[in-house]
Amino acid sequence: MIPELKFSKAPASAAIAKVYADLASLKSSSLPADWLKVMEHHGYPEGEWIQVALAPGAAWLYIARPPATRYGVDGEYRALEEFRKAGHRLERLCKGHKIKTLQTEFHPSQGKGHEALLEGLLLSSYRFDRYLKSSNKVAAGKASSEKESKRLSVHPVNLGKEALLELAELCRAVIKARDLVNEPQSVLGAVELAQAFKAMGKESGFKVTVWNQSRIQQEGMGGILAVNRGSVRPPTFTIMEYKPANAVNKQPIVLVGKGVVYDTGGLSLKPTPGSMDSMKCDMAGAAAVGATMQAIAKNSLPVYVIALVPATDNRPGGDAYAPGDIIRISDGTTVEVLNTDAEGRLILADALHYAKRYKPELVVDLATLTGSAVMALSSHATPCMGTADRNQMQAMVEAGFRCYERLVPLPIWEEYGDMIKTSVADLKNIGGREAGAITAAKFLEHFTDYPWLHLDIAGPAFLDAESTYRGKHGTGHGVRLLYSYLRHRSMLPKVPAQAATSRTSSKFNKK
Ligand SMILES: [Zn+2]
């Protein structure tokens, strides 16, 4: 259960975590002499929590590392990431010492750093434990207050209530995305995913429309239908809309999330270890865009956003689509299927074509699309490609640095388009071994006529081993990125989309 952020003064019995900008600010503060002795004993290390008092009244001190100067823009944002990681370690310390109430302080007060620390702490508390016997007992009501009483209360000193409430909602949304990703396909199919979005919309205040199989047939969404043919469970197409009266944009920003709820590869079957065994995560893009809708609605961002999720599983059953098939996407484009495991782009093609009717300011799709993206950047970054102008691309890249869901632009030059040409259809669905992330993007580009960005999150969406506050398995990757982008966009004045996108980057650092 996510720790609770409190706005009241911490009780005297609370544990204390104090962060100091540097050694000088630690030495100039009026700390108990025995605490300073402990710090001296340890040699005043930077970037480490040092316990200076035991429970009750446990206390930890932390001296920040000097800001990084390497790696250009990455270095500028590195300090915040260090605080998120410190928040992760603090969460582990609290758990280990069975701390129930914690007061956090920054000296001197540093709002962004303090928020980052809390962000790391909140996100680190996540466990996907609902299937554990111990957790079931709690759920069954045997001790329904047990979990609640174990919940950590955090009292940050000198942080605005508004910023904390916003942060808590954002973290809740990330955790919602993680839950959706971690839920096995046997529980969460395309229909259940759409139901989850309905529930989220009702709870958070955005509109959700779900199309069933026959509606998808009426729309001629041949990509979704082809991928779904090997399944006994129907596909869905979900349209989410958040349109506040005070929105800064007239033309919506459209988010598109790949919702392959399980990917066996179809007839081009995947091997199990290290491949099919994690493929419940193939709807991580869908989870991210749905959870982003939750976050922006909960926090009432003044920005008009639509989210589209085509969803199905990809199986080799009965009448499964096969290599050699030629299918027709809803815009009329024919596609020669040469590998049924390149299915994500087929269902995204229908969604991207559908997005044209909104005349969007920008479309951003998130998809666990290619192994090629993982080979290039691992889980530390996401390739970012598209036709958006350089200001929009730059704004998204900056958003990535702010929340440390970093993006790396890759080209989608004309020449790459030749790699998905075939003589028997308008396109083929794979481009060969080289530049796989790029040829996938070239395929998607065919179905766009608006400014567009494609984020291939196959690397960071799902982790086999724990990685600090990102956790293990579903990371909810993309929620903080999109939120950061949309929040920044929502702070721009009401101007036509064209003018809005040509703003300089000087505003980006302000959040
Ligand atoms: Zn696949």
Image (cartoon, rainbow, N blue to C red):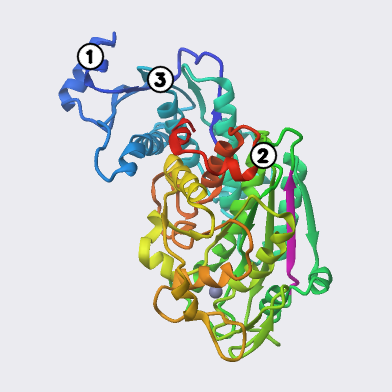
**Which residue position holds label 1?**
27
Q: CA distance from mark 1 to mark 2?
A: 46 Å
Q: Earlier in the sequence, mark 2 or mark 3?
A: 3
**First to last magenta residue range:** 233-242
**Which residue position holds label 3?**
105
Work out whether residue 90 can be spotted.
Answer: yes
Total marks placed: 3
Circle 1 sits in a helix, a strand or a loop, which is it? Answer: helix
Q: In the image, what residue occupies the spot 42% across and 32% down?
A: 117
Q: Residue 239 in magenta?
A: yes
Circle 3 sits in a helix, a strand or a loop, which is it? Answer: strand
- State the quadrant of the N terminus: top right
Q: Amino acid at mark 1?
A: Lys
Label 1: how many residues lie within 10 Å, few (<14), some (14-19) or many (20+)?
few
**Which residue position holds label 2?**
303
User: Disc 2, ligand 1: is the CB inside 8 Å?
Assistant: no
Label 2: how many residues lie within 10 Å, few (<14), some (14-19) or many (20+)?
many
Percent coordinates x, y for residue 105 in the rendering: 40, 20
Percent coordinates x, y for residue 214 in the rendering: 84, 72
Q: In the image, what residue occupies the spot 44% across and 43% down?
A: 398
Percent coordinates x, y for residue 451 in the rendering: 59, 56
Magenta segment's dominant SS is strand
Q: In the image, what residue occupies the spot 55% across and 33% down?
A: 167
